[in-house]
Image (spheres, rainbow, N blue to C red):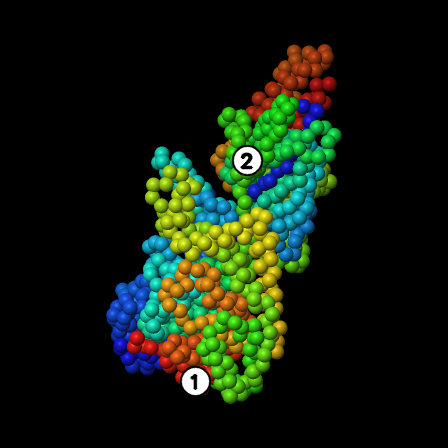
Amino acid sequence: MNELCKKGLAETSRLLREGEFKSIELTEVYLREIESRDPAINAFVTVCADEAMAAARAADKRLAEGIDIAPLTGVPLAIKDIFVTEGVRTTCCSKILGDYVPPFDGTVASKLKAQGAVLTGKLNMDEFAMGSSNEYSAFGPVKNPWDKERTPGGSSGGSAAAAAAGLTPATLGTDTGGSIRQPAAFCGVVGLKPTYGRVSRYGIIAFASSLDQVGPIARDVTDCAIMLGAIAGHDPRDATSIPAPVPDYLEALTGDIKGRTIGIPEEYFVEGIDPEVEAAVRGAAKVLERLGAKVKEVSLPHTKYAVACYYIVAPAEASANLARYDGIRYGHRAKGAAELDELFRRSRTEGFGPEVALRIVVGTYVLSSGYYDAYYLKAQRVRTLIRDDFLDALGGCDAILAPATPTPPFALGEKADDPIKMYLNDIFTIPASLAGLPGLAMPCGVTKSGLPVGMQLIGRPLDEAGLLNIGHAYERATEWHKKVPLDG
Amino acid sequence: MSKYEAVIGLEVHAQLATASKMFCACASNLRGAEPNTTICPVCTGQPGTLPVVNGGAVEMAIKVGLALGCSIQGRSVFARKNYFYPDLPKGYQISQYDKPLCHGGSVKVRTKDTDKEIALIRIHLEEDAGKLLHDYGHPEQSHVDFNRCGVPLIEIVSGPDMRSPKEAGDYLRTLRNVLVYLGVCEGNLQEGNFRCDANVSIRPAGQKELGTRTEMKNLNSFKAVERALAYEIERQTKVVDGGGKVVQETRLWNDAAGRTEQMRTKEEAHDYRYFPDPDLMPLIVPKEWVERVRGSLPELAGAKAARFVAEHGIKEADAAILTDDRRLADYFERVVTAGAPAVKASNWIISELMRELKDTEEGIAACPIRPGHLAELIKHIEDGKISGKMAKTIFEKMYQDGSDKVDLGSFSQISDTSEIESIVDKVIADNPKQLEQYRGGKTAVMGYFVGQVMKATKGKANPKIVNELLKKKLK
């Protein structure tokens, strides 16, 4: 493996600015790495070499002139195939989007472009972001770089795997019920789901509108902070984006957490959690105490309703968000349909995978006449209770510490046939999603069999800076983030 | 038919005349645009796009709500109405469901046939769908034009207060005029910017309970609404009289055949699975905004007509004609402001001007004569410079040529009394026979003398003075 690919985002950015190497050289290196090592991982669904080289050349000009340099200028990056990128195929890893090439850039893609980032490709994911193992992809499963028989998690499996394998210095994923945090934990990397509304959703293919959020995945907290700074902020094209100012996230990384209070929720340490996962997370609590934080027990009593609540709300919103895939304007259209109903039915049946079809059916059902009140309306009310639990607890602590997943990464094929088993992977990440709160996942251990364990820090609304700082302090005192098998 | 009472409710969809669409920045309502040219990723439902509310459309809806006496809700919610159709790119329409922008209100209908206040139930905002074209040159293909997709609409739902097709037609005409007056809608049924669906049922006269209703669509003119309602009332009457039950269904009006036809039954009706749109925050309309809009409401037709009668002293019937079109009313007032006497101005506009405008589609907007120039022309008549007859000729010429000034040309009236007097004296002297006839009691001969004076003056003598002088001298 080329040494350049082992460097994280901060270092890469600095070296580019110092002229240590050119973007075009670095981009070529990454493209060769992707070509030689990705087939074993399958993190990439599209590699856009020509566009990347053109962008690298433009970035080099900018770097040479010294004008308008941003942290991402000249940095080769790949991002989840859920981001709409003009001129570059965007599929959401679904057959129904076939060879859809967007005629526009989403806000996040625009921001990256404006800063001169170099897009190397689009990353594999569970179809329409629905999954926890990246096994529900029209482009085949992604292999966990730590153990290629195991899943990298999902839905941002390709993103977490690419970051862990050194195929991109940092990346972006999306998180609706845990799709950044869970794969980050499974791949031993850092992943942040910001507060709902912190980053624009314009240009991410919608799954569940009231839950979707864009966030960074990288090999350390500093790199995540840089990525967040590049994409956060109000967007007039997204009516749900928050008009709050964006702080300097790097400045917030003082590493000093003396006097901070960390809450440990009793409901998260119940039966079913792998003992090694529990041990690693409790070990992290001890580290934080050593660093000067106070640790106390808190209670989030409605936690046990979270998964059921999520699996009503998210599919309901998805059933409407995915109605636009009707074969009329773009994407897959069934051939030879004799009339309209047949055209719709066949296009969608041929184009959607089974998990997506399942969720659309569930979502349609819970919104249907006679059932709306009992399911969707009730779930939204339960959601308020879950959020209130968090806000109450966060009134007395700065962050909540919990496991990110109940188990270490499981084997490919182990849970793919049992949706409920698969859904329970998100048991620790879903509550914070429902509450709209920021969640930071980071490595806190390695199991005896050499698999990564991740912890999760959940914070107050818009306190990404606080979370990142706690993570940064923890990282400086530990070595888990360095265990990523970059040569794997 | 008097043994049954018809109960009619109407749903009107009016396109708002905003510059841009309801949820994106595309130009809205652009006439004559080629298909699929005023579109963008948002209104064509591309993956990853999001709606953003057009505040201008909300303001227009508030205007309508206030003009019709509705209660404007401080908090209303946009909801998704879910169904599949090729002209609906997202597979759902963003509308409002159980929390609309306006509640209540009414439309006061005062025409020569109808004097009634029709209650409104609600007014809400929503986006329009695209257009399907089935005859675009291919026998087996339909085409979709998304230009109209996303254009802002208000849906105005009346109570079941109308009792006859005429009342329904008058309600629609009145409502349309209010919207045009407010400047929020073009109000043209043929162009599709003002659409109507009708609900009608019948019940035995005196019964309080409503009968089963049917809904009618594809009503493309006020006349079509009235004819369709008349047909449907009769059809339902025949069904009930024959011992049957009216089926609750949606029927399509076939204008060519003059009948309604079954479209879909209640069982086939859509379950729209309404839920609040999670991409949009609840619409908050603070009281300050409502008051600001209230302060900017223009004077509506009824109030304007009353003011014309009181301030300008014109007849009620004439005031009604002038105020029917707001732009015509404005034109009239500008003519008066430019110095023409109000009643004369009103007469000129109603007779001469409206005759010229009769066959145009754009109405007063097509008139090439500026209000100031019409006022000038009328003032020349008052001053005696030209006769009324001369003025009519000049007016027609000005209208034809589109000329930019009042050119009296060779027209000039002789109003010098002594000049006319000498001509009158000569004419009387030259026609002794007629003078004797007149003095003998044949007063109609006056017309001959007037004609002779006019001939001698080449039509330029001031007719009023000629008549006065002749009356004096023929005695």
Q: Quadrant of residue B197?
A: top right
Q: Which mark is residue A91?
A: none
Chain ID, mark 1: A
Q: Position of residue A287 (x, y in %)?
A: 49, 85
Q: As shown in the figure, which amino acid type bears the numbered disc 1?
A: Thr
The chain containing the residue under callout 2 comes to B
**Visible in this render: residue A99?**
yes
Return the x and y of residue A340 as percentages of the image width and height. 42, 41
A408 relative to B179, above or below: below
Percent from the top left, x then y, of residue B83? 49, 46
Compare residues B66 and A387 and report the one nearer the observer.
A387
The residue pinned by badge 2 equals B265
Q: Work out how far the residue at label 2 is from the one at label 1, CA to CA, in angstroms.
A: 69 Å
Above or below, comparing residue B363 to residue A233 in the picture:
above
Task: Using the image, determine if residue A276 lies above or below residue B255.
Answer: below
Q: Position of residue B441 (x, y in %)?
A: 72, 12
Whether discs 2 and 1 lie on one chain: the answer is no
Q: Nearer the viewer, residue B412 or A346?
A: A346
Q: Residue at x 59, y 71 (%)?
A: A300
**Residue A226 appears in which quarter of the rendering?**
bottom left
Residue designated by label 1: A478
